[in-house]
Image (cartoon, helix red, strand yellow):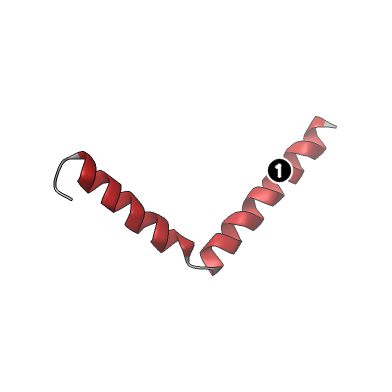
Amino acid sequence: MRERAGKALLLVGLATMILGLWREEALLVLEKAIIICLQCIGIG
């Protein structure tokens, strides 16, 4: 039972990663991370 649940979660995780890459959300997340880092060190 646990093995089956683990495989199901893995498939859901992979599917959401592929969907995010397809929608080009990785670039959006990277841009937000850069802004947050710059604000933390006082530049942005």
Tell me residue 40's x, y (percent).
Answer: 22, 40
Q: Quadrant of residue 5?
A: top right
Foreground residue, 15 or 7? 15
Q: Residue at x 26, y 45 (%)?
A: 37
Judge whether 44 appears above or below 22 on screen.
Answer: above
Disc 1 crowd, CA 10 A, few/some/many (<14, 14-19, 20+): few
Left or right, 8 with respect to 31, comes to: right
Q: Examine the rendered structure and indicate whether residue 2 appears above or below residue 9.
A: above
* Rendered residue at 22%/45% (across/down): 39
Residue positioned 81% across, 39% down in the render: 4
Residue 12, image x and y in percent?
A: 69, 50
Q: Is residue 10 left or right of residue 43?
A: right
Which amino acid lies under the numbered mark 1 shown in the image of this protein?
Leu
* SS under mark 1: helix
Report the residue at 17% width, 40% height from top: 41
Residue 1 percent across, percent down from the top left: 85, 32
Residue 6 position by quadrant: top right
Residue at the disc numbered 1: 9
Q: Which residue is situated farthest in the left direction here?
A: 43
